[in-house]
Image (cartoon, rainbow, N blue to C red):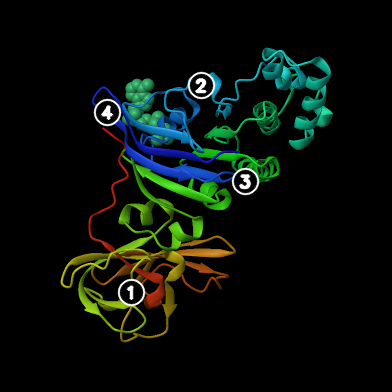
Amino acid sequence: MVSIITRNLTKSFGDTTALDSVSLKIEAGELFFLLGPSGCGKTTLLRHIAGFYTPNSGHLFFDMQEMTHIPAHKRNTAMMFQSYALWPHMTVAKNVAFGLEERKVDKPEIEHRVSAALETVKMSQYAGRRINELSGGQQQRVALARALIVRPQALLLDEPLSNLDAKLRTEMRAEIRRIVKESGLTAVYVTHDRAEALSSADRLAILNKGKIIQVGTPTDVYRNPRSRFVADFIGDTNFIEGTLEGDTSREHLYSIATTHGRFWARLPEGAEPPQRDSRVALSIRPECVQLAPHREPRNTLHGRISDVIYLGDTAQYVLETDGGEKIRIAEMNPTGALSPGDQAVFATAKPDDVLVLDAIPATASPIQ
Ligand code: ATP
């Protein structure tokens, strides 16, 4: 396993800047996710690591070794795509063996490694089956075995689960994590599915318009997004605009004046405090808003429930405030007592669950 380092990696295609001075360190043995909206540069970055693209400027290292201009076939990486690129009429064993046959490895060694790789992905009993006789999930396991058998220094996965249905995706993302960890690989995984990244990553980078916007563990990025863009991209959230009145001098909380009254909120960890009197946006996730019996002196919203989606374990409400804003609320273990209508309610959120972010609206638009 290797660490993968990019330093100011920049790549343009005509007028499009696909990567804009990307600097990143992926630790050896890490399962690292690249997450971002369509066209943000995820695949372009992965292809630079694989060696399919050369940057216009910047550098790429595997550990201490400069790889920027080393061709793909000399990098010892393995790539897995969303279309698994398997040969449909060949057997599973033949497909998995292919990479080693190309490298003229001895036959007994190939047999040994094929059987070990199939065991890792729990496909030993299908060795003699043809690919077109397998389900999508089984084909994906074969593609993983084929990538692993060459003993790559890094495994590169480009939206590997997008052809699978939702249930199989959930199952396979756990399997990919298990296999990557058991094999002791550095793995870089591209997706635009936040649930995939949050559930499986050691760390992740969020990209937008060719730039890295934030890097961190799933909990850190979810709980401490440092911009509206990240808060909105990594999960559902409500934004309320307001003016920063100042530090409340209580447990690092800030006081913000909004049309709903005063809110106390915290800064995301690592964020620079905004200036007093500046416009800010408060981010409050639906699961952090609780219905309340009465108005609190601060952090209170008032309005009517305009929509209810009951899902058994949770319910999703829309609270339409007196000013006409729509606030989404998620309630665990709902009693089902609320229904849309004229019912006036209060809702509140703990200061620790309200984040002070920049006022600039989140734009998840792809590169033009
Ligand atoms: P998606 O999630 O849709 O796959 P992505 O984040 O992987 O998107 P990239 O495929 O890296 O995005 O593309 C980044 C930008 O570079 C896009 O605007 C894309 O149109 C452009 N681009 C990528 N490859 C090429 C190419 N070979 N020629 C011209 N433009 C390209």
Left or right relative to 309: residue 179: right
User: Is label 3 or label 1 in front?
Assistant: 1
- Please tell me which of labels 2 and 3 falls first in the chain: 2
Q: CA–CA distance between discs 1 and 4? A: 39 Å
Instruction: Identify the residue at horizontal 84%, vertical 30% (top origin).
Output: 125
Tag 1 residue: 265
Tag 2 residue: 72
Q: Amino acid at mark 3?
A: Thr
What kind of element bears circle 4?
strand
Q: Is residue 308 visible?
A: yes
Q: CA–CA distance between discs 3 and 4? A: 34 Å
Q: CA–CA distance between discs 3 and 1? A: 34 Å
Q: CA–CA distance between discs 2 and 4? A: 24 Å
Q: For the residue carrying disc 3, how many other residues have a C-alpha within 10 Å: few (<14), some (14-19), or many (20+)?
A: some
Instruction: Identify the residue at horizontal 84%, vertical 19% (top origin).
Output: 108
Q: Is residue 348 visible?
A: no
Tell me if the residue at label 4 has its CB under 8 Å from ligand 1: yes
Tag 4 residue: 16
What kind of element bears circle 1?
strand
